[in-house]
């Protein structure tokens, strides 16, 4: 079965080392991140610690620092860096012809 993809923004709408918040019906927002190298990742916009808005954090390497308590969250897995523990949901991302897409089923389910 092929995934259905939902376009959420243009790649240029996400600043390098920044994020864009994507609202969705029935659930918390998704944060779509772009690294300095142009890689794109998507996580639930909630830190696993206290629910801080990861989209407002500082992106460095392949991680984001939560703006509330500076927890470091891996963009590729959503996992908190030790000694902190916890994980936030990640979403499949596809970039095609300058358009960023998220998996429609994941957007509805997570």
Image (cartoon, helix red, strand yellow):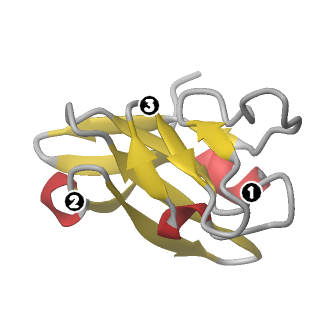
Q: Is residue 87 above or below residue 81?
A: below
Q: Secondary structure at mark 1?
A: loop
Q: Quadrant of residue 26?
A: bottom right
Judged left or right of residue 33, residue 92 is right
In terms of sequence position, does the residue under pointer 1 or pointer 3 come before the other?
1
* Residue at the spot 38% in from the left edge and 32% down from the top edge: 61
Q: What residue is pinned by disc 2?
A: 15
Q: Quadrant of residue 51?
A: bottom right
Judged left or right of residue 7, residue 37 is left
Q: What residue is pinned by disc 3?
A: 62
x, y percentage for residue 46? Answer: 72, 62
Asked if marks 1 and 3 touch (Cβ < 8 Å), the reply is: no
x, y percentage for residue 11? Answer: 19, 52
Q: Quadrant of residue 19?
A: bottom left
Quadrant where the N terminus is found in the figure = top right
x, y percentage for residue 108? Answer: 70, 58
Q: What residue is pinned by disc 1?
A: 47
Q: Residues within 10 Å of mark 1 (few under 14, many from 20)?
A: many
* Residue at the spot 63% in from the left edge and 58% down from the top edge: 66
* Residue at the spot 64% in from the left edge and 40% down from the top edge: 73
Q: Secondary structure at mark 2?
A: loop
* Residue at the spot 47% in from the left edge and 47% down from the top edge: 102
Q: CA distance from mark 1 to mark 3?
A: 16 Å
């Amino acid at each position: 079965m092929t995934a259905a993809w939902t376009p959420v923004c243009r790649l240029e709408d996400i600043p390098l080392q920044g994020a864009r918040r994507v609202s969705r019906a029935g659930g918390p927002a998704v944060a779509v991140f772009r690294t300095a190298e142009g890689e794109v990742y998507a996580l639930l916009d909630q830190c696993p610690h206290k629910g801080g808005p990861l989209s407002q954090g500082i992106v460095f390497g392949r991680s984001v620092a939560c703006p509330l308590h500076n927890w470091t969250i891996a963009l590729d897995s959503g996992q908190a860096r030790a000694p902190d523990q916890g994980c936030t949901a990640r979403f499949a991302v596809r970039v095609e012809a300058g358009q960023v897409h998220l998996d429609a089923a994941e957007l509805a389910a997570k």
